[in-house]
Image (cartoon, rainbow, N blue to C red):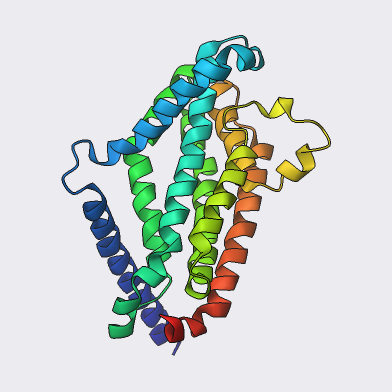
Amino acid sequence: MVGNVSGLQQNQIKRYWELLSVLVARNLKTRYRGSILGVYWSLLNPLIMTGLYTAIFGATFASYYNNSIINYVLAAFTGLVVINFFSASTSQALTSVVGNGSLLNKIKLPVSIFPVSMIAANIFQFAVGVFPLLALMTWVNSKSIVNVFALFFPFLGLTLVCTGVGFLVSALYVFFRDLPYFYELVVFVLWISSPVFYPAEIVSAQIKPFLRLNPLSAIIESLRQISLSGAFPDFILISHALLSSVVMLTIGWFCFKLWRHQFMDLL
């Protein structure tokens, strides 16, 4: 009996993985059909915005990065790749269930596959486009392969946060079709409350406890500490980033599972 249950679970996991592979490939082909740079377009926005932030804030904030404009450039870039990944993956996940409503009405599929496929497509894009540059940057600053491998942990935290938010917003969008307009405001608040283009040290002590509620802040700080400081990875920062990410994933999955039985009536 136990063997039959285990075999059934393995078949379900295999089917889920095969469906995920098909949907990710479809998403990427649709997104970059006819594109010259393909997935490397994901680098263009953070590079341009890094140049803009450096021109405006570089001289002001360089003192927080060992009086080095180069260090500020790298710090701004790490913050931007995090917020861009979050914004792109969760915004695409938001419409994924409703956007595939006609398919769900024809074929019995696991509903969660659609937001997960959007996150997975962005993971592939990040791994091919942005991560090699972050790894090179980390190696140059730290000369440590440990730090390069440690980049995996804040990125894992970022993935978990995005998956949790993706589950939550994709479920909410089934019920509230004007959610994308409100979500743009939410993303802006998260962006401005994250140390993307400014150092976390400039935030007053009274405000910092509220900013710590933003799960992206710990991820950005951990990523910067690993890639820019040259010191051994700070596992307290990493733990904070992963803990907040697991909490966000749990909340998102709980809400998605709680409301899922109502989806088909509204799609």
Q: Decide if residue 165 is on the left or right side of residue 240.
A: left
Q: Which of 252/210 is in front?
A: 210
Residue drawn at the location 50% of the way across and 39% of the way down: 82
Q: Decide if residue 146 is on the left or right side of residue 206.
A: left
Residue drawn at the location 33% of the way across and 66% of the way down: 17
Residue 24's place in the image compared with 60, above or below, is below
Residue 215's place in the image compared with 108, above or below, is above
Q: Residue furthest right?
A: 206
Instruction: Locate residue 130, reporting x and y percent.
Output: 38, 35
Please say whether residue 113 is visible from this viewpoint.
Answer: no
Q: Residue furthest top?
A: 67
Residue 96's place in the image compared with 132, above or below, is below
Instruction: Locate residue 156, reporting x and y percent.
Output: 50, 47
**Quadrant where the image shows the N terminus:** bottom left
Q: Which of 150/137 is in front?
A: 137
**Quadrant where the image shows the C terminus:** bottom left
Instruction: Locate residue 7, reporting x and y percent.
Output: 37, 80
Count the labels in the image: 0
Please say whether residue 256 is visible from this viewpoint.
Answer: yes
Residue drawn at the location 69% of the way across and 39% of the way down: 236
Q: Decide if residue 20 is on the left or right side of residue 84.
A: left
Residue drawn at the location 54% of the way across and 72% of the way down: 256
Q: Which of 144/168 is in front?
A: 168
Instruction: Locate residue 120, reporting x and y percent.
Output: 38, 55
Residue 4's place in the image compared with 229, above or below, is below
Q: Residue furthest left?
A: 34
